[in-house]
Amino acid sequence: MDEQALLGLNPNADADFRQRALAYFEQLKISQDAWQVCAEALAQSVYSDDHIKFFCFQVLEHQVKFKYSELTEVQQQLIRETLITWLQAQMLNPQPEKTFIRNKAAQVFALLFVTEYLTKWPKFFFDILSVVDLNPRGVDMYLRILMAVDAELVDRDVVHTSEASYYFALTLEARRNTLLKDTMREQCIPSLVESWYQILQNYQYNNSELTCQCLEVVGAYVSWIDLSLIANERFINMLLGHMSVEVLREEACDCLFEIVNKGMDPIDKTKLVESLCQVLQSAGLFSIDQEDDVDFLARFSKLVNGMGQALIASWTKLIKNGDMKSAQDTLQAIEAKVALMLQLLIHEDDDISSNIIGFCYDYLHILKQLSALSDQQKANVEAIMLAVMKKLTYDEEYNFENEGEDEAMFVEYRKQLKLLLDRLAQVSPELLLASVRRVFNTTLQNWQTTRFMEVEVAIRLLYMLAEALPVSHGAHFSGDVTKATALQDMMRTLVTSGVSAYQHTSVTLEFFETVVRYEKFFAVEPQHIPTVLMAFLDHRGLRHTSPKVRSRTAYLFSRFVKSLNKQMNPFIEDVLNRIQDLMELSPPENGYQALLSSDDQLFIYETAGVLIVNSEYSAERKQVLMRNLLTPLMEKFKVLLEKLMMAQDEDRQMALADCLNHAVGFASRTSKAFSNKQTVKQCGCSEVYLDCLQTFLPALSCPLQKEVLRSGVRTFLHRMIICLEEEVLPFIPSASEHMLKDCEAKDLQEFIPLINQITAKFKTQVSPFLQQMFMPLLHAIFEVLLLPAEENDQSAALEKQMLRRSYFAFLQTVTGSGMSEVIANQGAENVERVLFTVIQGAVDYPDPIAQKTCFIILSKLVELWGGKDGPVGFADFVYKHIVPACFLAPLKQTFDLADAQTVLALSECAVTLKTIHLKRGPECIQYLQQEYLPSLQVAPEIIQEFCQALQQPDAKVFKNYLKV
């Protein structure tokens, strides 16, 4: 072996050596006999370096996995002997091998097993057992090999891919695995189970590591072997004995969980679970002590959850089968576990609690199906409800300012509890409402002296009721009088209690979230609106010391104002004055730290727009208010643009460009307030927005920071096309001209949707403009597409692909908007060039999205130009190029019908052929029958069949024929 290259295997080796080692590994993988050198090195313990030993196993692994069939019988025998020799050496070595080497060796054994067990090595396990006997190091390897074999046969994380070949391989593998498991069940599983029992008996008191490993093996195999081999007195008694041994009980728990999880007859399952429970209960495991080892309790909780869910699954099957007597017995068994479930649910450790939620949820689902609840069941529901309320509460350690992994886990746990609460509401909505009301009122009466987490959870529960007791369109305050009254009382308490001033961010945020969720309350009691508005506007909301609260409040405030609509009328000008300072554009040079980020300011601008547009003011007053809102932005914009033109430093240029972009974004956002009922014109605001356009458009000719500036102005133009309609048209030609200068792929790709929007909206109105800019736009696109790119530059290739798609989408919009004359008037040479690019897009590029668009364009052009009075030479083009495209595209190897987009492309291809037949009639059939299809060497009967399908009046018939 290349000793120099092997030095690079050490993790501490420098980069050059590591690179050399990698190259050497690749070299050995393709070499014919390198594996033999590695096999010899392992069998004769040539190397003591762990990384070299691991490397040798990797070379062997590659050989077995990918090139085994190329070996002779003798060579295959050599690999078997090498592994057995290495295994024998393990028991004699003074020191055991490192874990990572043992695991890799086990993987190689497992690969050899799946390759050879059915044919050449049926005594695989017996050979290994005869070598290892009960030697601890040998047993360790035996158990690792068993886990590796199980991983090969069972643990299949399926990679989702559309490749048919992958699915085929997967099916073959699944069949092979089934055959292997069936053969193992017949030939060796009873012996393996016996070996596990001997290992457990031998090592349970003196080698906890091996015992735990063996329990893990039993747990893994129990899912696919005969359960009676494990679920019998001697095995179960031994496992239950392990439940009392501290170092073994976690693995024993997991092993019992796998046994309980095994699919079986519902009556047998109930008996199995009940017998386990009796023994566990008599061993004192059902009385939970908060001080117990939490790691064990988390596993125990998972086991109890498994037993509970197994009983519930049995109950469901028995009910379905109509066996009411057994179902009743099973229900009693379930009820008997509820006390234990509650102890685990309420446990202060969230992992222990989380592991039992599944059982709890399913139990409530049973209660929901019963016609009436017993007193005990009602008490259980109440106990679960109290547990959920208690467990929803934050603990002292929760870090609100810097949320990390623990906090994220609690948020997830809270989501699980929410599902329980929703299920409780389905079982007993009255009880839930009464319980929440009691907790809420008690807490809010004394909120000043109550800990933050209790205040937060009280408000949170009110918030959660909105989803737990659903109504349509948030109408919580009408309909059921009891419910409406209770919610109204709680909301009144929330907004009048002063709790919005509580000095903790979690309470503040929960207050605002709840107020917005129950916005319909303010339609019933509008007198509370000013109180809540003040909370939003002062130090409790938008001016809070916490940036997190300010940010969330900005969003919630915009929702609140939108929902109140006309009820905001008395407060409009006051609110606009109070938020004025929050809307200031903060230029980069003043060093002033604004209260809100630019993203938050977007919500404030939108809110201001909504207040003005939805007001009952006259159009003149609305115009004045909108001008007051937007003029400061325009003035700042002009000043900042001048500064940008003169800026030398690139960081400063970027900061100024961002600021200019924010100004355009804010103006754009105000326009979201308009609607079909309240248009810009009706509100008298057209002039203001036209002024904005005139202010912003000069930024397009700025040579600095083009990408940022163009992107902002482009978005503004998109909005103005919607809001100003034809009033925007005079600005489009010069804006387009600027945007087409010095273009890159991404610029063009983002510019085309703007042109598409204008084309689709204004159609013939913009025909002269389109005709004028059609070829300049195409030249810009072709120029970028023809730029040479490095072979492996994937991002450049992707940008070109996206640009190509945008180009075809543009042509589709032009043809689909009834403006094919825009193309026709470009002169014969240009028209031909455009048509050829479409043919190329349909056939040559393996991009089904673009292909689909190209066929849509082709069928539209055939529909418009393919008749007898179409442009000169187009009929020729149809037969010479469009018809062949419809055959060449699906015949390409890259045309993968397992891909949904490709199926759509084929469908459009069929439409194109149908359209040609529709426009050209019998002439088309004659051409296919006598000229084109015979030139492809298609058999006469297939030609006949194809032409018949094409002539069917129902287009679906032909589409389906083409697919087949």
Image (cartoon, rainbow, N blue to C red):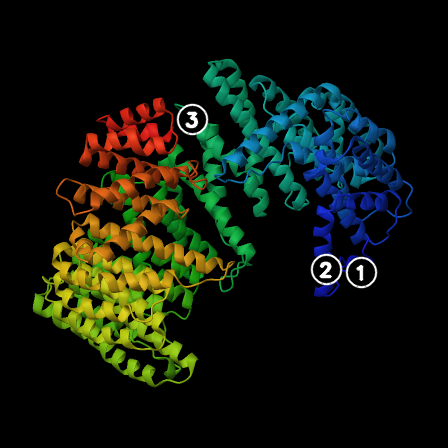
Q: Is residue 682 above or below residue 432?
A: below
* Residue appearing at x 64%, y 34% in the figure: 286
Query: Nearer the N terminus, badge 3 or badge 1?
Result: 1
* Residue appearing at x 24%, y 67% in the figure: 736
* x then y, percent, for residue 335: 53, 27
Q: Marks 3 and 2, how far apart in space?
A: 73 Å
Binning the other alpha carbons within 10 Å of mark 3 as few (below 14), some (14 to 19) or many (20 upward) gives some
Q: Amino acid at mark 3?
A: Leu
Q: Which corner quadrant of the image does residue 607 belong to? A: bottom left
Q: Report whether 344 appears left or right of 919.
A: right
Identify the element where label 1 is drawn: helix
* Residue appearing at x 54%, y 30% in the figure: 309
Identify the element where label 2 is drawn: helix
Binning the other alpha carbons within 10 Å of mark 2 as few (below 14), some (14 to 19) or many (20 upward) gives some
Asked if disc 1 and disc 2 are in contact, CB closer than 8 Å, the reply is yes
Q: Nearer the viewer, mark 3 or mark 2?
A: 2
Q: Report whether 795 appears left or right of 725.
A: right
Q: Which mark is residue 20?
A: 2
Which quadrant, please, contains the C terminus?
top left
In the foreground, 777 or 244:
777
Query: Nearer the N terminus, badge 1 or badge 2?
Result: 1
* x then y, percent, for residue 363: 49, 31
In the foreground, 44 or 359:
44
Identify the element where label 3 is drawn: loop
Binning the other alpha carbons within 10 Å of mark 1 as few (below 14), some (14 to 19) or many (20 upward) gives few
Residue identifier under label 3: 373
Residue identifier under label 1: 4
Q: Is residue 734 above or below residue 852?
A: below
Q: Report whether 100 appears left or right of 908.
A: right
In the foreground, 224 or 215:
224
Q: Amino acid at mark 1?
A: Gln
